[in-house]
Image: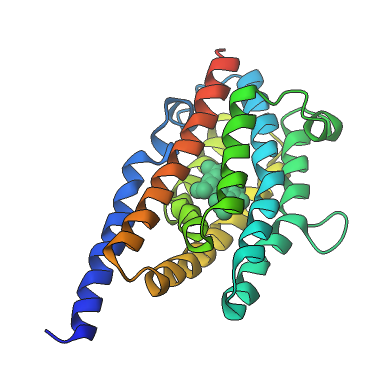
Amino acid sequence: MTSTELSREAIGGFVEALRAQSRFYHDQHPFHLRMNDGRLSRRQIQGWAANRFYYQVNIPRKDAAILANCPDIDVRRRWIRRIVDHDGSKSGEGGIEAWLRLGEAVGLSRDELRDERHVTPGVRSAVDDYVSFARTRPWVEAVASSLTELFAPDLMAERLAAFERFYPWIERDGLAYFRARLDQAPRDAEHALEVVTTHCRSAAEQQRAVAALTFKCDVLWRMLNAIDQAYPD
Ligand code: AHQ
């Protein structure tokens, strides 16, 4: 078997190991299962939206940390798109603005999202761990931790359908954020997968990339545990 065939087979096994992490993805968390079955109260949806806002506003800072640590200009040229997707290029644009509109659509003011009054200690701790991971771990491991987005599109589609079916009180325009993620997440996941399969050649590097993805699944799961506990009904 030539080194190229071996690397193709080795890469196949590596991608399979990454994709196998989907069993830990937060689409299976009881809070999301209840959300997608229409069983959440208005207060639980509000608590989720306010706490997830803390995750959203930290994503560009996490991505900026990866940019700061990444020596590869070609990777940076594509990775920087993520920051603009969330921050927008001017006021009134971007994913963070769209999430503020989601907050308003579920009955929260922009100020009570921005001032973090509803953010639980467990969500804050999980999100801060994710940002620290991106700042302190090798940049390729931080890229690998974003590969939860391999599993996101199905969840976004399921969530959109559930919100439209079970939560008619939520103003439809407030869901624009998730519609945008249907295109952004697969594009970003494809790039991140290309980066980790290019840069993680040894078994040890591949194991660390899989471990980074497991860590990120834990971050997302911890967030929902904290939200579930803070908003039991
Ligand atoms: O809205 C989400 C988002 O902007 C991102 C960025 C990405 C990353 O870099 O880790 N992950 C992510 C995710 C978002 N939404 C989550 C959801 O369930 O709404 C899913 C989450 C992810 O799959 O990592």
- In the picture, the quarter occupied by the N terminus is bottom left
Image coords of residue 17 (percent x, y):
28, 56
Residue at 58% over, 51% down: 136
Instruction: Tell me: residue 207, above or below residue 201.
Output: above
Residue at 57% over, 34% down: 126
Image coords of residue 181 (percent x, y):
59, 55
Image coords of residue 65 (percent x, y):
65, 57
Residue at the top extreme of this rendering: 233
Q: Closest to the observer: 209 or 101?
A: 209
Instruction: Tell me: residue 182, above or below residue 113.
Output: below
Tell me: 11 left or right of 193: left
> Looking at the image, can residue 133 be seen?
yes
The colour mode here is rainbow
Q: Closest to the observer: 171 or 122?
A: 122
Residue at 54% over, 57% down: 182
> Looking at the image, can residue 94 be seen?
no
Residue at 27% over, 59% down: 16
